[in-house]
Image (tube, coloured by chain):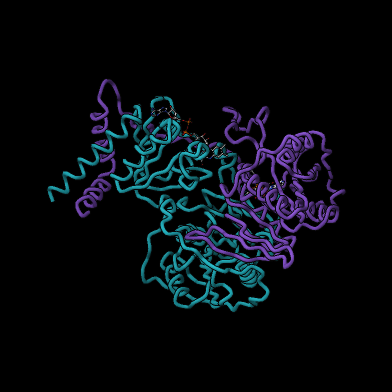
């Protein structure tokens, strides 16, 4: 069933990354996508663009600078009060207008919790395809985006193409792609885009914003060290052992999905396919079997250490260091030993 | 008020098995459930109905066996259920699915009254794209409120609705106007048990079944595989890591001795991490 790309769609060129920021903070997933977009653009020999929407020139210029230093050649910038707080109506309208005006070939966007995501709404206006939660983006021999994503909870992978529609859209979760190296001082072109959306036409109004005082779990995805517990820990109380070890290492903690279902940990601490993807330098999994849905969320870690009583647990297939032991007794011993080694150094210096 | 709730029948997540040789999904005998995220919308719908009066209609697009999920939804207290089922929908991606569901909602609106609110789940546990709710809203011109953690106020006269919406770094307080498509955050409520009377009613209820034509779908090119821009080209199993884990032998060692061995193994492999940790400890 080969689908031919129509002449109109053959005009579509360039790779676009939507640069998300909320209350002045650029979401790291946008930088990760710029890194990935750079590779696609180079391969296709086209430009990489960053899309920066918001209200307030200083903030937008800063986002544009970040986009350039992470690989963008050009930034499409729209500055308008209607874009002040993310609301999907005006963002979608502006994104649609931009796409219609400049006809990009590939538009990857971030997918994570509730933040700005005009990506998937765009998909409906454009009547094009969108591949969700991709773990790999590549270009095939026919200049088509090959987007690979886990299916059926990660037990299989599938490669999806958007054959006879443009742009080709994909979403990617945070931490799935590596964070590229910033190149400070790198610059590019800014194209200002005039917004034609009246505030009166937008039905939804933002009345208030209540910032989180300490949304610690949000940080988990970005921690250098993550310790996680699974059903092998047998009780909610034993998760204290995981938290203690994380604390002594200055890291963060999480768990497998059954712990969320049992109510032992909040859902934003779930690691894996339907939870958070992490890419720490050190990941310690205690009492976690290593189901594929868990594996896809941790595979990017530099060093995976598994503690499990079952020598045949699947986690040993992808851990770098494995230890067949009872986590309930080993975790406190590890906390103690790490604490001692690290404090020795404090006294010495 | 009229409230529509879209639910999807999905395989019970814990029980999906992949055939070890053929790498295909073994669906036979896998129990199905209502997508867990859809129940938060259903409960919210039932609460609103209990407060303001009206009806809750549950709807799904799927194979004939999806009536089971609709019946289940009725045991919680939904007033009626409708199934959209037709061969033409086979192979739908999210674009084709939101088209079909939007048509279903149109037809249901003509039949039982226009919806004030359409609830969708935040995402499903199988396809997991989170695209269908926004897709429906877009097609029907509904305003949309996603990731809602609570409905604070609803004014049936002015048709205004006030909600809290989870953002990345906080909660937005939003005011919008009905008709609206809402997806609820998980944990925002808990599905009720349903009464004995509901269970009885559900068991006897006749569940409305429409095919494409009955739902007013004329353009079959928008449906199923034909109406789906995404094409799955390849399905494959993840590759195993070539190198096996370095196993730390355990015999009669005490946990304390094991801990030392493990830390040595970690630091040998990650000397930079070790240095950074020591540095960090020293400066704190
Ligand atoms: C669509 C879908 C999405 C999913 N998404 C996710 C997800 O995002 N994240 C996720 O984690 N899971 C997810 N799952 C669930 C996943 O399939 C597994 O069921 C889950 O990861 C298992 O959790 P676990 O390893 O903690 O528990 P179990 O599989 O029960 O494993 C417990 C492990 O602990 C070991 N053990 C027992 N006692 C001890 C002890 N004293 N010390 C050390 N080890 C011990 C056992 O040998 C066993 O290996 C998903 C499933 C589906 C179908
Ligand atoms: C493993 C897998 C991967 C897939 N990947 C993609 C992909 O990358 N791109 C793509 O376009 N399609 C994809 N599909 C197809 C997609 O899942 C189907 O189109 C599906 O019908 C709807 O998408 P979803 O399950 O992701 O729903 P979501 O968009 O996650 O669902 C959100 C809500 O919409 C409502 N809803 C969804 N489907 C129905 C229904 N049939 N009846 C009633 N209400 C419903 C429910 O309220 C649900 O909670 C994939 C399917 C599978 C099984």
Farthest-out residue, left: A348
In this orientation, does residue B241 appear? Answer: yes
Q: Position of residue A151 (x, y in %)?
A: 59, 41
In the depicted structure, whether residue A195 falls above or below residue A133: below
Q: Which chain is cyan?
A: A
Q: Quadrant of residue B207?
A: top right
Farthest-out residue, front: B51
Q: Is B49 left, or right, of A247 in this rendering?
A: right
Query: Chain B is shown in which shade?
Result: purple
Q: Is A322 left, or right, of A8 in this rendering?
A: left
- Residue found at x 62% / y 33%: B24
In the depicted structure, whether residue A224 falls above or below residue B23: below
In this orientation, does residue A317 appear? Answer: no
Q: Position of residue A113 (x, y in %)?
A: 53, 54
- Residue found at x 67% / y 27%: B29
Q: Position of residue A163 (x, y in %)?
A: 67, 54
Farthest-out residue, top: B252
Q: As rendered, which of B90 and B48 lies closer to the eye?
A: B48
Q: As rendered, which of B122 and A21 lies closer to the eye?
A: B122
Count of numbered badges drawn on the protein: 0
Q: As rendered, which of B46 and A196 lies closer to the eye?
A: B46
- Residue found at x 63% / y 47%: B40
- Residue found at x 47% / y 67%: A23
């Amino acid at each position: 069933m080969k689908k031919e790309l129509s002449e109109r769609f053959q005009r579509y060129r360039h790779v676009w990354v939507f640069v998300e920021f909320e209350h002045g903070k650029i979401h790291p997933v946008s930088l990760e996508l710029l890194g990935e977009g750079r590779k696609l653009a180079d391969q296709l020999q086209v430009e990489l663009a960053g899309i920066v929407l918001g209200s307030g020139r200083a903030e937008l210029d800063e986002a544009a600078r970040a986009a350039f230093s992470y690989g963008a050649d050009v930034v499409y910038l729209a500055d308008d009060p209607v874009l002040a707080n993310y609301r999907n109506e005006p963002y979608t309208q502006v994104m649609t207008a931009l796409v219609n005006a400049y006809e990009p070939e590939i538009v990857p966007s971030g997918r994570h919790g509730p933040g700005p995501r005009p990506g998937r709404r765009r998909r409906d206006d454009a009547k094009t395809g969108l591949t969700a939660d991709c773990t790999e983006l590549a270009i095939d021999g026919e200049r088509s985006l090959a987007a690979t994503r886990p299916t059926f909870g990660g037990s299989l992978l599938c490669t999806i193409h958007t054959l006879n529609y443009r742009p080709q859209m994909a979403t990617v979760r945070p931490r799935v792609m590596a964070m590229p190296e910033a190149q400070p001082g790198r610059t590019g072109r800014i194209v200002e885009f005039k917004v034609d959306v009246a505030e009166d036409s937008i039905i939804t109004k933002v009345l208030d914003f209540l910032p989180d005082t300490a949304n610690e779990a949000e940080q988990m995805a970005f921690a250098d060290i993550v310790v996680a517990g699974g059903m092998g820990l047998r009780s909610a109380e034993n998760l204290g052992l995981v938290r203690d070890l994380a604390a002594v290492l200055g890291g963060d903690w999480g768990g497998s999905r059954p712990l969320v279902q049992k109510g032992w940990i909040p859902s934003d601490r779930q690691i894996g396919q339907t939870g958070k993807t992490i890419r720490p330098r050190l990941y310690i999994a205690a009492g976690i079997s290593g189901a594929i849905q868990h594996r896809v969320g941790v595979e990017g870690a530099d060093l995976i250490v598994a503690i499990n009583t079952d020598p045949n647990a699947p986690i040993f297939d992808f851990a770098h260091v494995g230890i067949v032991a009872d986590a309930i007794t080993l975790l406190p011993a590890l906390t103690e030993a790490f604490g001692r080694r690290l404090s020795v150094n404090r006294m010495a210096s | 008020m009229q409230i529509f709730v879209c639910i999807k029948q999905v395989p019970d997540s814990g029980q999906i098995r992949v055939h070890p040789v053929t790498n295909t999904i073994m669906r036979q005998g896998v129990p199905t459930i209502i997508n867990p995220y859809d129940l938060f919308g259903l409960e919210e719908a039932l609460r609103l109905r209990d407060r303001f009066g009206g009806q809750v209609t549950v709807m799904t697009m799927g194979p004939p066996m999806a009536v089971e999920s609709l019946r289940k939804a009725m045991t919680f207290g939904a007033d009626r259920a409708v199934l959209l089922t037709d061969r033409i929908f086979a192979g739908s991606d999210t674009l084709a699915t939101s088209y079909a569901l939007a048509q279903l909602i149109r037809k249901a609106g003509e039949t039982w009254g226009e919806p004030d609110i359409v609830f969708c789940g935040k995402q499903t546990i199988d396809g997991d794209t989170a695209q269908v709710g926004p897709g429906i809203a877009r097609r029907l011109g509904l305003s949309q409120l996603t990731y809602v953690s609570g409905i604070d106020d609803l004014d049936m006269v002015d048709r205004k609705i006030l909600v809290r919406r989870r953002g990345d770094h906080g909660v937005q307080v939003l005011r919008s106007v009905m008709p609206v498509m809402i997806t609820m955050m998980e944990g925002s409520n808990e599905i009720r048990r349903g009464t004995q009377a509901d269970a009885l009613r559900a068991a006897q209820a006749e569940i409305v079944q429409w095919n494409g034509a009955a739902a007013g779908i004329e353009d079959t090119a928008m449906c199923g595989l034909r109406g789906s821009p995404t094409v799955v080209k390849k399905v494959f199993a993840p590759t195993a890591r070539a190198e096996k884990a370095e196993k730390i032998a355990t015999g009669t060692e005490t946990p304390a001795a094991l801990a030392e061995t493990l830390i040595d193994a970690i630091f040998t492999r990650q000397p930079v991490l070790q240095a950074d940790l020591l540095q960090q400890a020293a400066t704190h």
